[in-house]
Amino acid sequence: MKVKICGLTRPEDIAAVNSTRPDYIGFVFAPSRRRVTAEQAKNLRAALHPDILPVGVFVDEDPLYIAGLFRAGTIAMAQLHGVKNEEIGRALKSLVDIPVIKAVQAASTQMILEALPTVADYLLLDHGSGGTGKSFDWQQIPDLDVPYFLAGGLGEPNLAEALALSPKPYCLDISSGVESMGLKDAGKIARVIERIRQAQTGGVSYAG
């Protein structure tokens, strides 16, 4: 199971992930307290370990803008939220060869299934429109032909439950669950990633 730490904004955040090596990190380009500019993301990306893939998070953004960030090397993947995410994903794929994550409001099994078929390479299942820091009812996740990122309210208290899910998430996407006072907490990031890696290798399990 892979790990994504989303909403990085500071050099200290980059240092924290460089030392723990999640598979992905997220730069939020949509309106949010974690929003970064293209210039900020470029500078943070330059300091990021090359083994960590940066994901750009967008809401109904112009595909030309997203493609420009990809061509510049600022992002390696696009995570698309909003009412036009399927349309934008299709347009983006026509411009550049970029992996796309389609965000889905997972309010019910039916809503998740209605997101398919999709041009996206992955789904991201989240509470509401995303970024709420709240989880949804994971028991309503159906069997999917597309690998999915699990997001929304993930952190140390419910990590064991997330790791035991079936169908198994492709990736756990964590943001507010590794923050203290609204900022990324290097200690929380390290603990969460260690426990996920232990589960991958069959090491000491996390009991909560």
Image: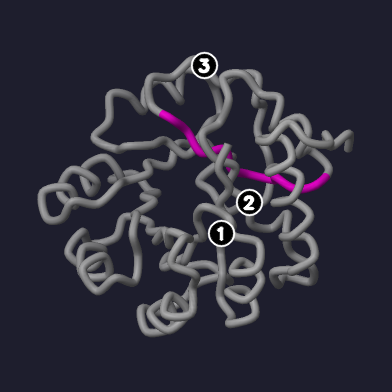
| Residue 147: assigned label | none
Above or below residue 9? Residue 95 is above
- Where in the figure is residue 131, as x and y percent of width and height? 57, 54
Q: Amino acid at mark 2?
A: Ile
In space, the residues marked 3 and 1 are separated at their CA atoms by 24 Å
Which residue occupies the extreme right position in the image?
207
Give the distance between the C-alpha atoms of the residues marked 2 and 1, in whole angstroms.
6 Å
The colour scheme used here is: one colour
Q: Is residue 163 above or below residue 92?
A: above
Closer to us: 177 or 195: 195
Q: Residue at x 24, y 46 (%)?
A: 89
The answer to whether 189 appears left or right of 78 in the picture is right
Mark 3 Cα shell of 10 Å, populated few (<14), some (14-19), many (≥20): some
Q: Residue 206 in the image: x percent, y percent?
A: 84, 37
Q: Position of residue 98 (x, y in %)?
A: 24, 52
Tag 2 and tag 1, C-beta contact below 8 Å? yes
Count of number-bearing discs: 3
Type of residue at label 3? Pro
Residue located 21% across and 68% down the image? 71
On whether residue 192 falls in the magenta region, the answer is no
- Crowd rating for badge 1 (residues with CA inside 10 Å; few <14, some 14–19, many 20+): many
Residue at figure coordinates x 29%, y 70% from the top left: 73
Q: Secondary structure at mark 2?
A: strand
The answer to the question of whether label 2 and label 3 lie on touching residues, with beta carbons closer than 8 A, is no
Residue 11: percent from left, percent from top: 58, 82
Q: Which residue is mark 1?
A: 6
Figure check: 152 above or below 168: below
Q: Which residue is mark 3?
A: 142
Magenta highlight range: 147-156
Pick whichever of labels 3 and 1 is earlier in the sequence.
Answer: 1
What residue is pinned by disc 2?
A: 174
